[in-house]
Amino acid sequence: MMLRFVKGRPISAVTCDFLLWVTQELGKQGKKALLLIWDNASWHMSKQVISWIKWHNREAKMSGGVRILSCLLPKRSPWLNPIEPKWLHGKRAVMPAQGLLSAEELESRVCAYYGCPKLEPLAQPLS
């Protein structure tokens, strides 16, 4: 599992930054393709993200990089999403019985639970 947090809302530009990071990391591992299964969140289906994926795949085909095969789940079908059970178990493991965690503490607990490095969060571009 590759995990990256975001400062602010997950908008289209941040999604493109995330996809670039993921494909670069997979390229370091010698992978050639990313099968991306995601829900119908607006930042997954935006024109900007769809255009970026098309551009990225053209570049990857020419340079031998990691290509992205994007598959959207049917609407209102979270049981088809293979990540949902992982999130449910993770949520139960990291959340205290009562009270709230700070963003920093939540991030630390999530990274520890999933065994992922704690990386600098992606940030929204400055307007």
Image (tube, rainbow, N blue to C red):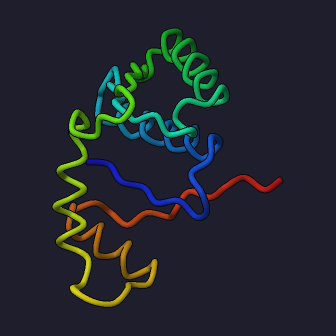
Q: Quadrant of residue 109?
A: bottom left
Residue occupying image coordinates x 25% and y 56%: 87
Query: Looking at the picture, how far across and down is residue 125, in whole percent?
Result: 72, 52
Query: Looking at the picture, how far across and down is residue 116, in whole percent?
Result: 28, 60
Please, which residue is most extreme toward the right here? 127
In the rendered image, the vertical position of residue 117 relative to residue 49, given as above or below: below
Residue occupying image coordinates x 48% and y 10%: 61
In the rendered image, the vertical position of residue 56 relative to residue 97, given as above or below: above
Q: Quadrant of residue 38?
A: top left
Please, which residue is most extreme toward the front here? 76
Query: Looking at the picture, how far across and down is residue 15, in whole percent?
Result: 55, 42
Query: Looking at the picture, how far across and down is residue 13, in whole percent?
Result: 65, 42
Lateral position of residue 114 relative to residue 121, left or right: left
Lateral position of residue 110 relative to residue 4, left or right: left
Q: Quadrant of residue 82?
A: top left
Residue occupying image coordinates x 50% and y 40%: 41
In the rendered image, the vertical position of residue 77 relative to residue 6, given as above or below: above
Of residues 119 and 123, the one nearer the viewer is: 123
